[in-house]
Image: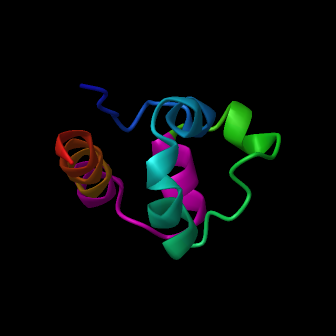
Amino acid sequence: MYQITKDTIVYDIMVNAPVTQPLFQRIGMHCLGCAFATGESVEQACRAHGVEVEPFVKEVNDYIAAHAEA
């Protein structure tokens, strides 16, 4: 099963787990296909949007797991 870390590039997540887009958009990451997303890690994106990275990584991984079982 696909899992992310704080070092995972946002663009890679959009390619491998596009179902997670609403989670990113909810916290203000609307530019998922922009140039920043192609080189920005989850940690960098969270910092830029004022979000704690570890809880967000857990939330995304839990969401991926829940949708993989569905």
In the displayed structure, does residue 11 sit left or right of residue 3? right
Asked where in the image residue 15 lies, by quadrant, the reply is top right
Does residue 43 belong to the magenta stretch?
yes
Residue 15's place in the image compared with 46, above or below, is above
- The residue furthest front is 70
Residue 36 pos. (x, y %): 75, 43
Residue 49 visible to an observer of this rendering: yes
Does residue 52 belong to the magenta stretch?
yes
Residue 43 pos. (x, y %): 46, 45
Residue 17's place in the image compared with 50, above or below, is above
Residue 62 pos. (x, y %): 20, 51
In the displayed structure, does residue 38 sit left or right of residue 10? right
Extent of the magenta region = 42-58
Quadrant of the rendering where the N terminus is positioned: top left
Residue drawn at x 48%, y 44% as measured from the top left: 42
Question: Magenta stretch mostly in which secondary structure?
Answer: helix
Residue drawn at x 26%, y 52% as measured from the top left: 54
Residue 53's place in the image compared with 64, above or below, is below
Asked where in the image residue 64 lies, by quadrant, the reply is top left
